[in-house]
Image (cartoon, rainbow, N blue to C red):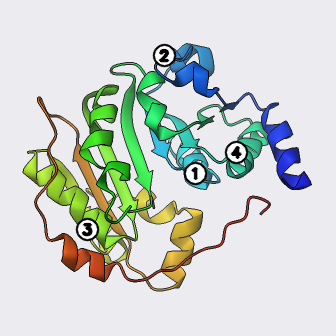
Amino acid sequence: MGKDKLRKFAENKTFRCLVQPSTSEVFGVDYKLKGKWNGDFFEESRPLVLELGCGKGDYTVALAQREPDNNYIGIDIKGARLWKGAKYVNENSIPNAGFLRTRIDFIESIFAPGEVSEIWITFADPQIGREKKRLTSPLFLERYRKFLKPGGIIRLKTDSRYLHEYTKALALSNGLEILASTTDLYNEERGGVFPDSLFEVQTFYEKHFIAQGYPITYLAFRLDKDGRIESPEWDEASYKDEDHHAFVIQVHDNQ
C-alpha cells in the first residue's frame, strides 16, 4: 500500500464528517447511529438524502451546498476516494454533508425505518448479466424500502442505457410511480421534472462521459409498493449491445 494512501487513511480518522464502521458493527446488527443521524451526527434535523457509490464525494458536496435544507450522506467503500470529499467538508465546515465508508450490502443495518427521504444512484456499475449486484435490482430496492419514508424517491443518473432501461422496466412492471425519465438529459429543457441541479451538479465520471459525447440518462421514481418487488421482463439483449462504450477511467486512489 502506497504512503499517500496510508496518509489519507490516517487523516480520514480525524474527520468528524466521515463515519467508518467495522464489519462487526453493521453485519447483522443495528449500527449505533441507526435512527439517530439527525441529532447525533448532523446537529440540525433535516430530510436525509443518500448518494450511493459516491466516489470522491463531489456530487454529495455540491448538492449539500446547493440545497441547505437537506442533510446529505455520500456512501462508498473506498476510503482513499472518500478522503477528498471528507477533507473538503471538514475544511469548509459544511454542516449538512457527511460520508459513510461501508458496503452498500449493509445499508439496512445503518438507517432506521422512515429515516431517509431520497436516494441518489449516480453512475453506478450496470452489472450487466449480474442482476443481484445491480443497485436498482429487487434485492437492493427491498433493502432501501426498509428505511425510506413513504413516498421516498430513487434518483438514477447514469451513462448506461442498459441500467436506465432495466430500472425503468422494473419500476413500470411493479407499478412504481415514475416522476421523470429521459435518455438524453442534456437535450431536455430545464424546469419542472428536470431542475437546474440535474444539469449543474456533475460527478467526476459524468464530466468525462459528457466530454466524450455520451448521452446522460435520468430516472426518478417513488419506491411505494406493498409486497414483493419482482424482476422485470425487458429487452435485455438490445441494451446490452447498446452499452458498448467501454470508456474506462483509470481512477487511482492517490489522485
Disc 2 from disc 4: Cα separation: 22 Å
- Going from the N terminus, do you reach mark 2 or mark 3 first? 2
Instruction: Name the residue carrying label 3.
Output: 182
Q: Amino acid at mark 2?
A: Val
Vertical arrangement, residue 160 with respect to residue 173, above or below: below
Mark 1 Cα shell of 10 Å, populated few (<14), some (14-19), many (≥20):
some
Between label 4 and label 3, give the one nearer the viewer.
4
Q: Quadrant of residue 42?
A: top right
Q: Amino acid at mark 3?
A: Thr
Vertical arrangement, residue 173 with respect to residue 202, above or below: above
Instruction: Name the residue carrying label 1.
Output: 62
- Going from the N terminus, do you reach mark 4 or mark 3 first? 4
Picture mark count = 4
Q: Circles 2 and 3: CB distance less than 8 Å?
A: no
What residue appears at the point 53 percent right and 39 percent down from the top-left corner?
A: 103
Mark 3 Cα shell of 10 Å, populated few (<14), some (14-19), many (≥20):
some
Between label 2 and label 1, give the one nearer the viewer.
2
Disc 4 from disc 1: Cα separation: 19 Å
The percent coordinates of residue 113 (x first, y second) are 34, 19
What residue appears at the point 14 percent right and 46 percent down from the top-left corner?
A: 177
Vertical arrangement, residue 1 with respect to residue 123, above or below: above
Instruction: Name the residue carrying label 4.
Output: 79
What residue appears at the point 74 percent right and 27 percent down from the top-left corner?
A: 16
- Going from the N terminus, do you reach mark 4 or mark 1 first? 1
- Going from the N terminus, do you reach mark 3 or mark 1 first? 1
Where residue 29 is drawn, which disc sits there?
2
Between label 4 and label 1, give the one nearer the viewer.
4
The percent coordinates of residue 116 (x first, y second) are 39, 29
Disc 4 from disc 3: Cα separation: 33 Å
Vertical arrangement, residue 174 with respect to residue 4, above or below: above
